[in-house]
Image: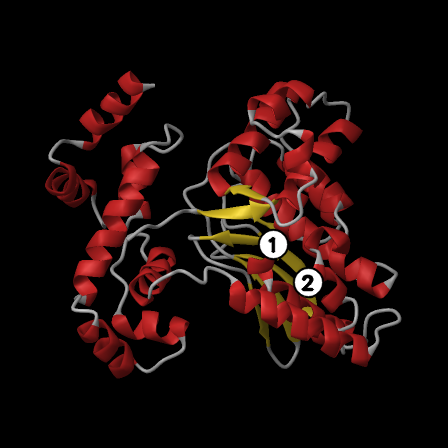
Amino acid sequence: MTITLGDISIRYVHHLLNTAEDNGINTTVIAEQFLLTPVKLQTPYSRISIPRFMRLGERIMSQAEQPDLGLKCGQSIHLSELGLTGYLAANASSLSQALVDIAYYEKLSSQNLRGHSSVSISETQVKFLFYSISPYNNYNYFIVDLALRGTLNFINELNQQAIAPERVNFEFPAPSYVALYANYFQVPVYFNQPENSVIYRKKDLSPAPHRANPITYLEVKAECDKRFNELNPNDSFVEQVMNEIGPLLTAQKPSMEQVAHNIGMPPWTLRRRLKEEQVRFKDLIDETRKSLASIYTKDPQYSLEEISFLVGFSNPTAFHRAFKRWFGCTATQYRQQLNRQD
C-alpha cells in the first residue's frame, strides 16, 4: 500500500516560473536544478510532487528576496491555468457555480493529501475555502497566498470587471510582509483565523460569467467528469480509504463515520468492505500514519514536533513511541540515516 503527499499540474509550475521572470528573477539555473527541462514544461498532463513545487517556490523567493511571490502569482493567474476546469467555469450558470466547479474539479490540476478546496453557500454569502496546510513556515505561505489571491482573479476574469469580496481570511499569523496584503486584496484581510477563505456576498456572484454558454457547459462538464473518474484508476479500495484518512489526521484520530462520508458511502458499508478486504480501520490509520511519518521525516523543513501533529498525535511522546515501533529506531536516528545516505 502506497501513499503520497500529492502532485500539481505543470501549468502551475510554468506560471510560477513565468511570474518570477516577469518580476526580474532569472529562473534558468533553478529550473535546471529541479529538472524542469523545456520538454517537461511543455508536456500536457505532466505533474510534479507537491513537496517539490513548494521547494521550488521557496528557492525562488529566497534567492530574489520576494516573499510575496505567491501573491504576485495569484494576481496574474488566469482561468487558462486551470485547463478544462477554467473553460467549464467560464460557461457556468452563475459566478458562484463557477467557484463550486473550480473547487470540485481541483484534482484535475492538483491533488494534495492535506485536503481539497470547497465552497460553502449560505443565504447571504459564498465562501471559497482553501484547505489547511498547517504547520506554516516560510516555504508554504505562498501556496495559500496564490490560492486566495487567485480566487479573486478568477472571479474578476469571469465577470469581466472586479467584484470585491467582503473579507479574506488566512489561517496563519501575519507574515513579515503583511503590509503588502492591502495592495493585493484591497479588502479587509485577517490572520490567525480558523480557516483560509475568501467570502463574497451571494448577490454579487449571482450573475453568469461573461458570455457563458449552457450547452458548452454541459459538453465540457462531461469531459471533466470523464477525466475526474480516470484519476488514480489503479488505487485499491484500501488505498482510497487511506487517502481519505490522511487529510483528517492532524492531532486527532479520524472516525469511520468521517471517512465513510468523504468516500460517499454509509459507515456500515465501509465496515463491510474493509472486512471483505480483511483489514481493520484502526490498522489503516496506523499504516497511514506510518507512511506519512516516513515521508515527512525525510523533509528537513519539518521539525519532529510538527510531524507529530501532521500524522495525528496529540503529543510528541506518543509519536516517538509509535515511530520506534514502526521503524525500529527513533525519528532522529531515522533522519540521520537518511542524511548519511545523501
| Residue 59 in the image: above or below residue 160 | above
Residue located 36% across and 33% down the image: 302
Q: Mark 1 points at which residue?
A: 109
Which quadrant holds the C terminus?
top left
Judge left or right: residue 156 versus residue 252: right
Q: Which of marks 2 and 1 is nearer the N terminus?
A: 2
User: Label 2: few (<14), some or many (≥20) within 10 Å?
Assistant: many
Residue located 66% across and 42% down the image: 43
Residue located 55% across and 59% down the image: 107
Judge left or right: residue 52 versus residue 266: right
Please name the amino acid that badge 2 sits on: Thr
Residue located 77% across and 44% down the image: 76
Among the 4 quarters of the image, the one containing residue 204: bottom right
Tally the marks.
2
Among the 4 quarters of the image, the one containing residue 129: bottom right
Q: Please report contact status of discs 2 and 1: CB closer than 8 Å, yes or no.
A: yes
Judge left or right: residue 171 versus residue 101: left
Residue 34 place in picture, x, y as percent: 56, 27
The residue lying toward the viewer, choosing from 23 and 316, is 23
Residue 14 place in picture, x, y as percent: 69, 38
User: Label 1: few (<14), some or many (≥20) within 10 Å?
Assistant: many
| Residue 164 in the image: above or below residue 210 | above
Secondary element at tag 2: helix
Residue 245 place in picture, x, y as percent: 32, 60
Please name the amino acid that badge 1 sits on: Ser
Can residue 333 be seen in the rendering of this structure?
Answer: yes
Q: Mark 2 points at which residue?
A: 85
The residue lying toward the viewer, choosing from 254 and 29, is 29
